[in-house]
Amino acid sequence: MQRITVLGATGSIGKSTLDVLARHPQQFQVYALTANRQWRLLFEQCQQFKPRYAVLLDADAAEQLQTQLQQAGLATEVLQGADALAQVASAPEVSLVMAAIVGAAGLKPSLAAAQAGKRVLLANKEALVMSGEIFMRAIQAHGATLLPIDSEHNAIFQAMPAGGNGDLAAMGVRRILLTASGGPFRTAPLASLKEVTPEQACAHPNWVMGRKISVDSATMMNKGLEVIEAHWLFNASADQIQVVIHPQSVIHSMVEYVDGSVLAQLGNPDMRTPIAYALGYPERIESGVSALDLFKIARLDFEAPDVQRFPCIALAYAALRAGGSAPAVLNAANEVAVAAFLERRLGYQSIATVIERTLAKVSNTAVDTLEQVLAADALARQVAQEQIQIC
Ligand code: NAD
Ligand code: MG
């Protein structure tokens, strides 16, 4: 029996994770479930999975949950605050941690899991974008295992040679072909992008996801963050990662080898596949995802990304090439700009402008420690807020 902590249990990835776990009660036991402030859903999840701990960031929500659990006679203990997230991610009883908090807030608990030598199932790409070097070092130094949940990176992981040592040349890998759906605005008239609303941006053609990643998919900053994520996970340079628009989202990414072979992983666009892969690894377990019907899909299309339409892709490549604090600054400015867009304080097209200006204003520094990463993150947030006032 393996014990698991699910960070961000009430989110899109968290719910899909619990769906898969419920199919394998003999194999997995839920140790802790965490959320920001959604105590009602967390309560329902506690009723079903009876975890040892439930953690909420918000103090009032934690109190509400505590009362509900007591009334229901459940033994789950409620903890509150950011330190408690790290505590349940690193507890000795736990062997697996699903890191599915959205944004920079997930960095500390995800890193705590790495430092405690856990098998880390990483959905929280922002953590790796911010602190790639520190994170990968922690995984190595503490004998942890990092398994990507992002569907593209999970696909790449599956298409890479098993037990590869991260030396792409030695493995005969030439390039990573990172697929992208192109989001809801791939073919929209450029002039119409001025008027884009949060509702339109969140209506993704193929995936149902949290609001932040949905906006990132619309601007394609999601793909930009994923380029940086792939760099750290697979030791690939910016030049070795090619974004390929593939509107059907059936191929989840590919690895190109020096002999001309291209290995792809295909499947229905359902996050339960990569989640089940990482939970069962190296075995394969049932995920509840329906079989791929190639006759129904009939055709697969590919096109090059349009950087005029999607300036965020170029900003992310530039940040990766610049290194240092630039990816953390990019990520922080994006989080602030997306939040402002969702609150209707910023236009859709100004998201890229705010990120570009923030990158230009914040000088690039070395980020060898977590404190340096968090300082760059804080400064970038402040500068991005100022830019939002001007936009
Ligand atoms: P979501 O918004 O649906 O859920 C986020 C979860 O994090 C919730 O449980 C929320 O309570 C929790 N949370 C939010 N802010 C928090 C904070 N400050 N402190 C503690 N907990 C907090 O997001 P999601 O779509 O599930 O995405 C989660 C992560 O997975 C993101 O990093 C996203 O990029 C990544 N991801 C998601 C998908 C997808 O299909 N949804 C696919 C690939 C990668
Ligand atoms: Mg993805």
Image: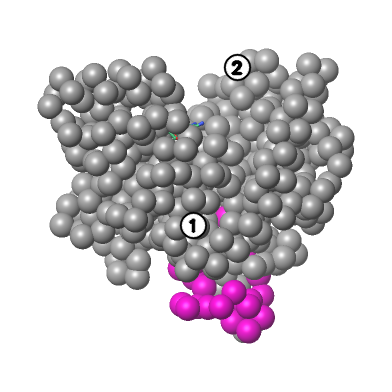
Task: Name the residue at 34% across, 47% down.
Answer: 5
Residue 123 % position (x, y): 48, 48
Question: Judging from the image, what secondary structure is the residue with disc 2 in?
Answer: loop
Residue 326 % position (x, y): 77, 47
Task: Name the residue at 45% across, 47% down.
Answer: 99
Amino acid type at mark 1: Ala
The CA distance from mark 1 to mark 2 is: 34 Å
Question: Judging from the image, what secondary structure is the residue with disc 1 in?
Answer: helix
Return the residue at label 1.
114
Q: Which residues are magenta?
A: 154-179
Height in image: 21 above or below 163? above
- Earlier-in-chain disc, 1 versus 2: 1
Q: Is residue 174 magenta?
A: yes
Task: Name the residue at 26% across, 47% down.
Answer: 30
Query: How many marks overall?
Result: 2
Q: Depth check: 90 or 348 in front?
A: 90
Residue 358 % position (x, y): 81, 34
Q: Is residue 142 left or right of residue 34?
A: right
Q: Is residue 204 magenta?
A: no
Q: Which mark is residue 343?
A: 2
